[in-house]
Amino acid sequence: MLTTPSGPPGNKVCASLSPRVWVDFPQHYNNLIANYTNMKKERETINKGQEEMKNTISELKNTVEGMKSRIDEAKDRISELEDKVQKNTQKEQEKKKRLTKNEEGLREIQDNMKCNNIRIIGIPEGDEEEQGIETLFGKVMMENFPNLMKEKVTQIQETQRVPIKRNPKRPTS
């Protein structure tokens, strides 16, 4: 079809072109076709790359969502554990208070239950109540150890309380 240098018949634009253009036209045409083919391949490659990117982005989104859900679960677990720790701490404090209270009660019971177990030989029973323990002690010491009472003043090392009455509010064991 492109055999004449003047171009196709009836085409005024082509008729105004120089004969040299018509000679180089097949080469330019082939270059344009090659460029078009290369562009088409590049566009397909770009489209494939975009699809791969979209797939990768969606995978990353799924991964991030999974991580978020794991983080939320971990936060819930941590919160539950903190609540348990707080409850255990409160229970321990209550146990310590009860233990302290029980120890104080035990000490008080022991103090109330201790009684003097002194037996005075040679004095009729009941005289110690009438005369008093201290005066009887002084008489016995003067009779048995006359020099001791004059030289040193006796100091009391340990005393015990005797319960006056029983406390009805305290449980007995």
Image: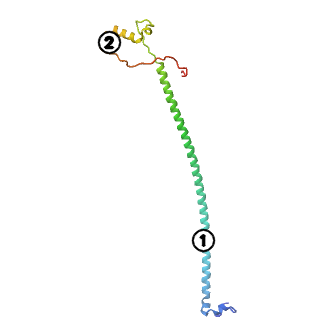
Q: Is residue 53 above or below residue 104?
A: below
Position in image of residue 153 (x %, y %): 33, 16
Disc number lying in front (2 or 1): 2
Q: Is residue 169 above or below residue 51?
A: above
Q: Which residue is located at x 55 percent, y 38 percent? A: 87
Position in image of residue 58 (x %, y %): 61, 61
The image quadrant of residue 84 is top right
Query: Which residue does the numbered mark 1 point to in the structure image?
Result: 46
The image quadrant of residue 16 is bottom right
Q: CA distance from mark 2 to mark 1?
A: 119 Å
Position in image of residue 56 (x %, y %): 59, 63
Q: Which residue is located at x 65 percent, y 90 percent? A: 13
User: Which secondary structure, mark 2?
Assistant: helix
Q: Is residue 81 left or right of residue 15?
A: left
Residue 149 disc label: 2
Q: Residues within 10 Å of mark 1 (few under 14, many from 20)?
A: few
Q: Report the amino acid beneath label 2.
A: Met
- Give the camera-side residue of 82 and 154: 154
Q: Which residue is located at x 51 percent, y 31 percent? A: 97
Marks 2 and 1 close (CB-CB < 8 Å): no
Q: Is residue 62 left or right of residue 155?
A: right
Q: Is residue 144 left or right of residue 33?
A: left
- Give the camera-side residue of 28 and 121: 121
For marks 2 and 1, the one nearer the N-term is: 1
Colour scheme used in the picture? rainbow
Q: Is residue 24 above or below residue 59?
A: below
Q: Report the amino acid beneath label 1.
A: Ile
The image quadrant of residue 157 is top left
User: How many labels sit on residues?
Assistant: 2
> Which residue is most to the right?
10
